[in-house]
């Protein structure tokens, strides 16, 4: 476990570290798993996805100045993309929570009440606070 200020990070397997968002009354834990990938920037793509000198931006790495080439700042053609996934760890099992039906097999005995709660409160499953409030209701 690693704490950074008020945030806590824990490994859930050999290669994945997640952020612990909340521990509920029944001992289950809401975790935030961040998946990242690097994508190439589209700022120099021309027509039909090709890159041409006339239809796109050309980035230079050096420039001639008085007979000498001066290095310019390295162009960054890559964009980090971070996807957040919420995971509920209960009784040693991990469940990805992406929609209301994700909770059906976890809280089968309270499913009717959970559907009523969701109809009244309309939780956003990408919003951390909405998900915490829904899971607090589930674990009462």
Image (cartoon, helix red, strand yellow):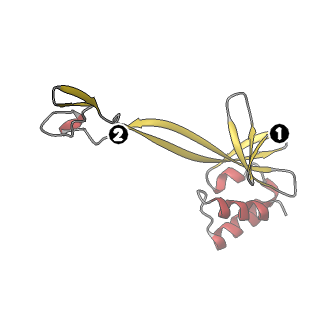
Q: Looking at the picture, tell me which residue is in the foreground, 56 or 98.
A: 56
Q: Is residue 107 left or right of residue 99?
A: right
Structural crowding at the residue carrying mark 1, measured as other residues with C-alpha within 10 Å and reported as few (<14), some (14–19) or many (≥20): few
Q: Looking at the picture, tell me which residue is in the foreground, 53 or 64.
A: 64
The residue at 61%/47% (across/down) is 85
Image location (x, y in percent) of residue 64 = 18, 30
The outermost residue toward the right is: 26
Question: Quadrant of residue 10 in the image?
Answer: top right
Q: Are marks 2 and 1 in contact (CB under 8 Å)?
A: no
The residue at 20%/38% (across/down) is 46
Count numbered badges in the picture. 2
Mark number displayed over residue 2: none
Image location (x, y in percent) of residue 24 = 83, 56
Q: Secondary structure at mark 1?
A: loop
In the displayed structure, 57 sits above or below 20; it is above
Question: Quadrant of residue 34 in the image?
Answer: top right
Mark number displayed over residue 41: 2
Q: What residue is pinned by disc 1?
A: 92
The residue at 76%/66% (across/down) is 113
Q: Is residue 26 left or right of residue 111?
A: right
Kindly report which numbered mark, 2 or 1, lies closer to the viewer in this rendering.
Answer: 2
State how far apart marks 2 and 1 are (Cα). 40 Å
Q: Earlier in the sequence, mark 2 or mark 1?
A: 2
The outermost residue toward the bottom is: 120
Q: Secondary structure at mark 2?
A: loop
Image location (x, y in percent) of residue 67 = 16, 26
The outermost residue toward the left is: 54
Q: Looking at the picture, tell me which residue is in the foreground, 78 or 13.
A: 78
């Amino acid at each position: 476990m690693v704490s950074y200020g008020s945030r806590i990070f824990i490994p859930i397997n050999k290669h994945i570290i997640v952020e612990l968002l909340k521990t509920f009354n029944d001992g289950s834990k809401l975790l935030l798993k961040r998946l990242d990938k690097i994508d190439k920037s589209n700022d120099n793509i021309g027509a039909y996805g090709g890159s041409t000198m006339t239809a796109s931006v050309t980035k230079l790495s050096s420039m001639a100045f008085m007979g000498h080439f001066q290095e310019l700042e390295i162009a960054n053609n890559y964009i980090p993309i971070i996807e957040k996934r919420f995971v509920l760890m209960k009784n040693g099992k991990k469940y990805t929570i992406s929609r209301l039906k994700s909770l059906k097999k976890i809280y089968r005995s309270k499913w009717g009440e959970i559907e009523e709660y969701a109809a009244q409160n309309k939780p956003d499953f990408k919003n951390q606070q909405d998900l915490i409030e829904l899971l607090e209701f589930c674990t009462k």
